[in-house]
Every structure is written in structure tokens, then in C-alpha cells.
């Protein structure tokens, strides 16, 4: 994922950036609401998610979130990471996205980033991609069964020492699994028009 | 522990050390900002002071400096109520006390 990070506390944003990097995500870091908002308005970079402080110079995190949402068809994966503790602010932010207290960031940020990733994946996953993923899983299972059968056949050839052996599946369970896998594969391929 | 976890732990430990080294400077900034507000009150200066207290409260909580976080949070809460010079005058001594408590907390952490 490519993540937009905005927090006016440099050490805190370095921590978020470091955790994102360790988890294999890239990021752009902004130390004020103004800089983050300028970048979002330029609209020259594709972000998959944002981790935003709430109380910042220029623009607050929720204002940056609204701009990101506008640029992304109304929904955008966001984590508000805040030192604010009053319930009014929390209730308001919870309606917009995920929220965590800075106090819990050291222990809990990795988990929250995983949640953001799942959210971003769900948004980016269109119908065809989902069908292709399902078909891939069916194909994998089909190949596994074929490999099993091939191994059994090879073992039979090794035992008889002959190239002229008619191999028959004599395991009813395997026969059944193969039929199911074959049907499932055909159905999946049909769904994605292969 | 796998390498990624080790890497993350080392990074977090370094940032916590860096933050600890910054605490005196951050408290000096808060004291200076408070003096600024007192010398010539305006909402921009007050927002700056509030932001410094808020930031210290949040990040010290992140790195486990609980006493500093509690003192900075108490200061932040008082500052949120200040919306005029009159209120500032009224709460002056309480704010001074909170800034003193913040200094004491930084010495005990």
C-alpha cells in the first residue's frame, strides 16, 4: 500500500513511517495539515490509505479525510491516530473511519495497519478480480489432485517396470475429489469467461 | 523473534530514546509559549501553546512516559477553556501550577 501520513509531531510520524516500512508499505509523511491538504488537492499521487493526526496546524485530520474521500468516490480507508480523549470527538471520528489512541500506538499500530490494508483491498477488489481469485484457488486444488494421481501412476510404473500399464484410479475418494475439482474448475472458468 | 520484529523493536527503542532526549526542549518550548501568551494574549499564541501541550501529552503517552503525559494532558484541558484574556487572568495561577507539575514530572521520569 502507499499511505499518506500526517502528524505534526515528528517523532510520532517517524514511528508510523517506520512501522509501515517494516510491514512492506511505502508512505508520504506530512508534518502539518496544510502540507497534507496541498498534496491531496494536487491529486498527483495514488494513496490506498491514510493515517492522520486530528489536531494539526492548518487543517485537522478529519478535513484531510473529507478531501481524500472526495477524490476516491466517497470511501477511503483511514486511521485517525489521536491524543484527543473526549468522547464527543471519538464518536464523531468513529463515524468516518478507524480510530486509535496515541497511547496504544506502539503496541497496536501494526494491527491497525493490517485492518487498513484489508479495507483498501476490499475497495480495490472488483468483481472480476474476486472471481479470478476463486478460480485460482479451484485450479490449485485441481492441480494438487492431478499431482497425487500422477505420483500414484508413476509408483505403479516403477513397480511393474513396464511402460505399458493401464492406470486406473482405484481410490473412490480420489475419484470423487477429482470429479468435484474438475466440475468446480469448469464452473469457475465459465464465470470468468476463460 | 523474526527479523522484522527485531527491526521494528530496535526502531521503536531508538525513537523512544530520541523522544526522551527531546523532553526538556519540549517543556522549554511550552514555558516560552506560555510567556508569549502572557506578554501579549491572542488566540493564535494560545492555540500554539495548546498544540504543544497536546503533542507532548500524546507522544509521551505513546512512549510510556505516563507522568509527563498526565501533566501535559491536564495542562491541555485547562488551556482548552481559555477563550479570552479575562479567562486567562482568572486561570493564570492554575496554568502556572500545571507547567510546574510538568517540569517536575519530566525530572522524575
Image (cartoon, coloured by chain):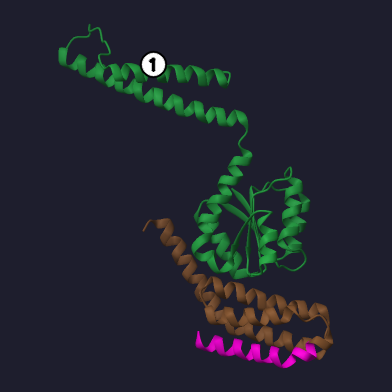
Residue carrying label 1: A179
Quadrant hosting residue B74: bottom right
The tint of chain A in the picture is green
What is the magenta range? B88-109
Residue A173 against residue B38 in the figure, above or below = above
The answer to whether any part of residue A139 appears in the image is yes
> Which x, y percent locates residue A88?
70, 65
- Give the left or right position of residue B70, taking residue B9 as reference: right
- Give the left or right position of residue A193, taking residue A37 as reference: left
Residue at x-position 50% and y-position 53%: A23
Quadrant hosting residue A123: top right
> Which x, y percent locates residue A164?
22, 6
Q: Nearer the viewer, residue B3 or B72?
A: B72
Q: Main secondary structure of the magenta part?
A: helix
**Which part of the image, by quadrant, shows the N terminus of chain B?**
bottom left
Residue B22 against residue A10 in the figure, above or below = below
Quadrant hosting residue A30: bottom right
Residue at x-position 68% and y-position 79%: B76
Residue B80 against residue A8 in the figure, above or below = below
- Give the left or right position of residue B28, taking residue B1 as reference: right
SS type, badge 1? helix
Task: Pinpoint the chain carrying mark 1.
Answer: A
> Which x, y percent locates residue A17?
57, 60
Amino acid at each position: 500500500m502507499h499511505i499518506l501520513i500526517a502528524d505534526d509531531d515528528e517523532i510520532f510520524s517517524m514511528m508510523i513511517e517506520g512501522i509501515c516500512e517494516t510491514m512492506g508499505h511505502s508512505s508520504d509523511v506530512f508534518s502539518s495539515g496544510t502540507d497534507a491538504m496541498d498534496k491531496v488537492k494536487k491529486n498527483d499521487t495514488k494513496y490506498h490509505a491514510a493515517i492522520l493526526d486530528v489536531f494539526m496546524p492548518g487543517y485537522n485530520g478529519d478535513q484531510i479525510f473529507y478531501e481524500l474521500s472526495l477524490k476516491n468516490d466517497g470511501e477511503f480507508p483511514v486511521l485517525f491516530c489521536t491524543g484527543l480523549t473526549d468522547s464527543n470527538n471519538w464518536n464523531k471520528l468513529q463515524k468516518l473511519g478507524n480510530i486509535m489512541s496515541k497511547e496504544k500506538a506502539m503496541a497496536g499500530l501494526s494491527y491497525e495497519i493490517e485492518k487498513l490494508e484489508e479495507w483498501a483491498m476490499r475497495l480495490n477488489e472488483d468483481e472480476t478480480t474476486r472471481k479470478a481469485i476463486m478460480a485460482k484457488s479451484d485450479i490449485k486444488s485441481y492441480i494438487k489432485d492431478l499431482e497425487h494421481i500422477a505420483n500414484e501412476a508413476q509408483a505403479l510404473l516403477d513397480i511393474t517396470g513396464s511402460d505399458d500399464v493401464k492406470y486406473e484410479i482405484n481410490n473412490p475418494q480420489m475419484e470423487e475429489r477429482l470429479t468435484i475439482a474438475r466440475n468446480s474448475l469448469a464452473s469457475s472458468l465459465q464465470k470468468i469467461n476463460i | 523473534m523474526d527479523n522484522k520484529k527485531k527491526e521494528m523493536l530496535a526502531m521503536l527503542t531508538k525513537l523512544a530514546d530520541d523522544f526522551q532526549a527531546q523532553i526538556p526542549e519540549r517543556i522549554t518550548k511550552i514555558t516560552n509559549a506560555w510567556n508569549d501568551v502572557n506578554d501579549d494574549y491572542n488566540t493564535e499564541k494560545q492555540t500554539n501553546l495548546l498544540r504543544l501541550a497536546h503533542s507532548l501529552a500524546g507522544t509521551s503517552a505513546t512512549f510510556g512516559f505516563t507522568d509527563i503525559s498526565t501533566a501535559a494532558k491536564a495542562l491541555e484541558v485547562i488551556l482548552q477553556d481559555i477563550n479570552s484574556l479575562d479567562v486567562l487572568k482568572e486561570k493564570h495561577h492554575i496554568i502556572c501550577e500545571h507547567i510546574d507539575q510538568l517540569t517536575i514530572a519530566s525530572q522524575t521520569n
